[in-house]
Image: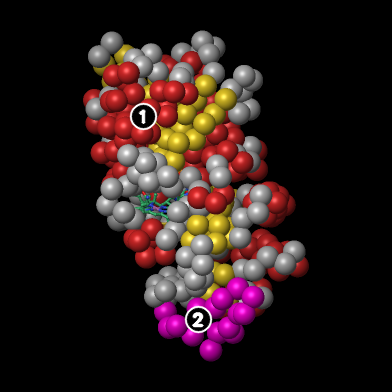
Amino acid sequence: MKTVLIRPSNPTRSGYLTEWGFIPTPLGLLQLAGCLLTLETSEVKVVDMEADQMQTDRAVDEVIRWNPDLVGVTIHASAAHKTAVQIAQSIKAQKADTLLVAGGHHATFLPNELLREGFDVVALGEGDDTIVDVGRTVQGERQLKDVPGIVFKKDGQIVRTQPRALIENLDRLPFPALDLVQKEKYTVRVFGSRDTVACLETSRGCPYACDFCSVTPTWGSKWRNKSNARILMELDQARKLGYDWVFFTDDIFVVYPNIKQRMDLFRQLIQQRFNLVDRADEGGCNGVEPRTDKAGIRSRYAPCIPRNRVGKPGNPQKDA
Ligand code: B12
Ligand code: SF4
């Protein structure tokens, strides 16, 4: 089975890109790829329109040349929705038998709209197990109606399957397939050069429920985290691949019941000679700063607070 996973470009150009030249590795897709590669005879290709500054036509040509059975499109931010739909419609027009699946935050909240616009299936919330199950339907091993956590079209009707339970033990996930992308494309200018940067996650969810935020409805209100041993293994993978930096995508990195685990993690990172830089804005992060200080973090990147807190790795400034 051949799968193409696509990150559509965001035509509004994210502030992270314009301000800091930040082109993050598409972690969600690489995690899905890691999961799909556990299936026998599965091949996965990633088309990253954002990193390659690709126009829709070129992206579609690349997908069609690869001749996939399954195409997954991440719709992380609503701003990428229009591009995602254009791609889906062009692929369908040229290769009608491709199963088109959308996922990510935007897709989770607006599945029916995406189905009307041309997608065959929308994965709701966590996609790791869902994409494997959908892959099995392509291989003829099961049916979409038996895959939890999706919305799909059947005979012109929209069908929503039973909800999928959240993954309790994140350590059971395969590693994100970082080796499917070229690290030179993923850079950040924050420290004045084009350093390479890999995204990794150490936890999912948030115990709070701010009413403007889509995190809790997508990831659940239970904070679930990977073990320190697992996090260190993933960091080691990124280091071996030669990335200069790792960007943790967690929504909330330290929560009260897990302060000790995080402190232990920071200590181990320092022992293993990782440079740690945290971002701690004034709003809501006051508890983090003294603790990260105590754990030995010497520099911070904190654009919203005074400049004396911005440190450069290798030449760290101590907080004033
Ligand atoms: C880290 C992060 C970033 C990073 C980029 C990370 C990356 N690797 O691409 C940076 C800082 C650059 C960033 C930028 C932006 N972000 Co952001 N970001 C996040 C954050 C905190 C985590 C994303 C992440 O990597 N999660 C970990 C991976 C594993 O999860 P994932 O990508 O969601 O994928 C999983 C599922 O969603 C699903 N899935 C996803 N895609 C697909 C596809 C298929 C086919 C399937 C089956 C499943 C599936 O399965 C995956 C595995 O479980 C989220 C909030 C959150 N907790 O999700 C906000 C979030 C996604 N960002 C958001 C926004 C608004 C933006 C910006 C538009 C901000 C701005 N104004 O500039 C830009 C847009 C960038 C772009 N080019 O589109 C919003 C999106 C809301 C919306 N509907 O628009 C979120 C939800 C934050 C929020 N609560 O408001 N972001
Ligand atoms: S992730 Fe941040 S903004 Fe969203 S609910 Fe949690 S604390 Fe609030």
Whole-percent x, y for residue 299 in the image: 58, 76
Quadrant of ligand 2 in image: bottom left
Whole-percent x, y for residue 258 in the image: 61, 60
In the picture, measured across the screen, residue 213 lies left or right of residue 36, that is left
User: What amino acid type is highlighted by mark number 2?
Assistant: Arg
User: What amino acid type is highlighted by mark number 1?
Assistant: Val
Q: Which residue is mark 2?
A: 309
In the image, residue 68 sits, relative to residue 22, either above or below, namely above
In the picture, measured across the screen, residue 166 lies left or right of residue 55, that is right
Label 1, residues with CA under 10 Å away: few <14, some 14-19, many ≥20: many
SS at circle 1: helix
In the image, residue 126 sits, relative to residue 263, either above or below, namely above
Residue 308 is inside the magenta segment? yes
Label of residue 60 in the image = 1
In the image, residue 50 sits, relative to residue 16, either above or below, namely above
Whole-percent x, y for residue 235 in the image: 66, 54
In the picture, measured across the screen, residue 296 lies left or right of residue 92, that is right
SS at circle 2: helix
What stretch of residues is rendered in magenta? 305-320
Q: Decide whether the magenta segment is chiefly helix, strand or loop.
A: loop
Looking at the image, which residue is at 48% across and 68% down? Answer: 190
